[in-house]
Image: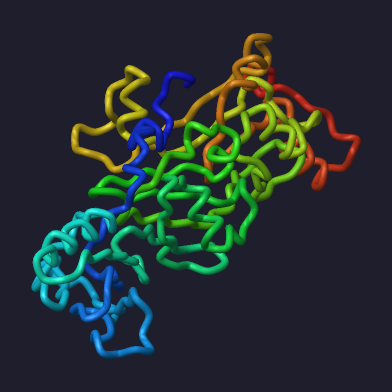
Amino acid sequence: MTRWPIASLRGSFGLRVPAKAPTIGVGDQVQITIWEAGTGGLFNAPVNDRVAAGTRGASIPEQIVGAEGAITVPFAGRVLVMGQTPYQVEQAIVRALANKALDPQVLVTVTRNVSNTVTVVGEVTAGARVPLTAGGDRILDVVAQAGGTKAAPHETFVTLSRDGLSTRIPLQALLTDPAENVPVRPGDLISVTREPQTFTAAGATGQNAVVPFDAIGITLDQAIARAGGLSDMRADPGGVFVIRFERPEDYDQLGLARPVPNPLAEVPVVYRVNMREANSFFLARRFPMHNKDILFVSNAPAAELQKVMSIIWGFTGLGATVVAASTVAK
């Protein structure tokens, strides 16, 4: 069981941090301010304006970067900005105005960042498109920016979708293993869902009920304890079963033949543990329970006989004598 693959964000997406300088993309809103070194230029007051200061600038109204990835700058024409950093766009505008303006200086500001965002949806306080910072953000950073999660960590799962690949892991795994808190990239989708983890206890256990995990995951011995243990009067220690549907790729690692040759979405599997054997206690300590598993403990043969006798005594009274059927046959 320990060698079975475990979902991992690090294994699926790696730890490569995106470039620290976000680039401008389609849908971003950009504002440009241009200064000139003296009066009488293209973007400042005329020479005869005695009130104006020596250096003046002009702000160009905000523009949304269209599908062609360019914006319009007066006297510079169309300037390509898609895939460029604000500094690169500033230099491009300065070059375009070199022979037209008086020693122009340009400041490019992204007032609304749409392309460099991560979408966070689901069980968060405020789902939103979260802008990314130049320092590099990770999953927990953007989830916190969306207000954090609503549910308890052990009931919360985080799914990261990128370039057609999605991986889902428990939130508690992100909190306990920093390597799983991978960097996010523009365009990522983070879905936070609440899924209470439970298993069903049935048969000769202390209680027959749907039992919550109350943790990121529990093992078989913990599941038995939470179900009230094995019933002293009824349980057969050699008949502890865990019933679940396994993924085909996990089932194949057991080295067993498929129950049917046709492709299956899930393979029904019954695991049996004989608690009469000492090594089974160590196995139970390492056997992980999955969500929606069924823990079933069979009745001991003596318990079945007791059931039959309780029915017979109801008709014959407590003074009845039990005689083996083989004795009568003789």
Query: Can see residue 155?
Result: yes
Residue at the top extreme? 278
**x then y, percent, for residue 74:** 15, 78
Residue 57 vs residue 6, the one in the foreground: 57
Query: Residue drawn at (68%, 45%), measured in percent from left and top?
Result: 214
Residue 39, compared with residue 13, is above or below; it is below
Residue found at x 24% / y 86%: 46
Could you tell whether 240 is left or right of 116 in the image? Answer: right
Residue 234 image position (x, y, % from top left): 75, 32
328 with respect to 1 (left or right): right
Horizontal relation, residue 43 to residue 315: left or right: left
Identify the image quadrant of residue 259: top left
**Residue 16: horizontal and vertical position, in percent?**
35, 34
Q: Where, quadrant-wise, is the C terminus in this rendering?
A: top right
Lateral position of residue 1 relative to residue 151, left or right: left
Q: Residue at x 54, y 54 (%)?
A: 195
